[in-house]
Image (tube, rainbow, N blue to C red):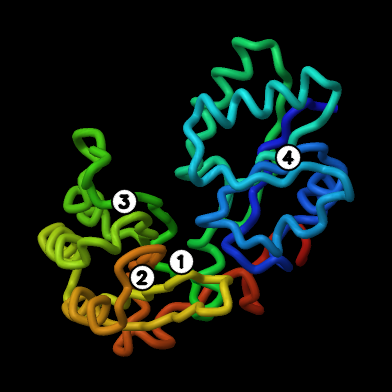
Amino acid sequence: MADVYFIGAGPGDPELLTVKGRRLIGEADLVLYAGSLVPAEVVAGAKKGSRVADSAPMSLEETHALMAETVASGGMVARVHTGDPSLYGAIREQMALLDAAGISYAVVPGVTAGFAAAAAAGRSYTVPEVTQTLIFTRLEGKTPVPEGEGLRKLAAHGSAMCIYLSAGDPEGVQRELLAGGLAGSTLVVMAYRVGWPEEKVVETELASLARAARDNGFTRQTVFLVLPGQGREDAGKARSLLYDKDFRHMYRA
């Protein structure tokens, strides 16, 4: 058993929290969650007498001190992150401090917003003969991206993309994707606060991405799903071989 569990809360819907995550939240002595991104309903199962704290106004050092204090007194910590902790979750810094303090930890995965958005839209990232690759990325802004990972260069692959943390500059997203060679007719799904009561999912074409985002007021907490091969003109063109009657594999003679 670990002292600290980093738990993926999913995108917002409490029913998308994993069974393991829910159990650990219910067993923890300290439940530390990012209240700006994780609804209080997700941590409502904390046991009576536990401390439930919102980490949104805290610094890294403050959250660490709170976790270390709980562990030192014999308690267990549930550190609850939005989506999946491994994706834009800033867990490496926390783990480094825990390592230095000799505190054990484990990670419980969660449903990231990109997958919840695809489900809400009824869309698939992979399309036979079009793309078998999905790129998770973001537009460069206050946080720089490494050379070679600019949106324009990634778009040149023609792969499906899920773009996080970029809703503040939809014009930049549109410009870089078009400059990378994607067609203006490429389907884009915009999902705002997916999994929350105010969830809104809008489909548009890449050439209209910026205008559609502005018209809908999507300036934050929005993911952009870029889906080559799924525009109106592409419907029904490609089918997976998996269930084709003539396709043979180890489970079908």
Q: Earlier in the sequence, mark 4 or mark 2?
A: 4
**Other residues around mark 2 within 10 Å, as few (<14) / some (14–19) / many (≥20):** many
Q: What's the distance in space between the residues labelled 4 and 3, CA to CA?
A: 28 Å
Quadrant housing residue 210: bottom left
The residue identified by callout 2 is: 227
**Other residues around mark 4 within 10 Å, as few (<14) / some (14–19) / many (≥20):** many
Left or right: 240, with 249 as reference point: left
The residue identified by callout 3 is: 138
Q: In the displayed structure, would residue 165 be above or below residue 226?
A: above
Quadrant location, the N terminus: top right
The residue identified by callout 1 is: 125
SS of the residue under disc 2: strand
Name the kind of residue labelled 4 in the image.
Ala
Q: In the displayed structure, would residue 214 be above or below residue 1?
A: below
Q: What's the distance in space between the residues labelled 4 and 2, CA to CA?
A: 36 Å
Left or right: 154, with 43 as reference point: left
Quadrant location, the C terminus: bottom right
The residue identified by callout 4 is: 78
Q: What's the distance in space between the residues labelled 1 and 3, CA to CA?
A: 17 Å
Q: What's the distance in space between the residues labelled 4 and 1, CA to CA?
A: 32 Å
Residue 6 is situated, as x and y percent measured from the top left of the image, at 66, 38
Q: What's the distance in space between the residues labelled 2 and 1, CA to CA?
A: 6 Å
Question: Which residue is painted at 37% across and 75% down in the image?
Answer: 189
- Badge 4 vs badge 1, beta-carbon distance below 8 Å: no
- Badge 4 vs badge 3, beta-carbon distance below 8 Å: no
Numbered label attached to residue 135: none
- Badge 2 vs badge 1, beta-carbon distance below 8 Å: yes
Name the kind of residue labelled 2 in the image.
Leu
Left or right: 196, with 78 as reference point: left
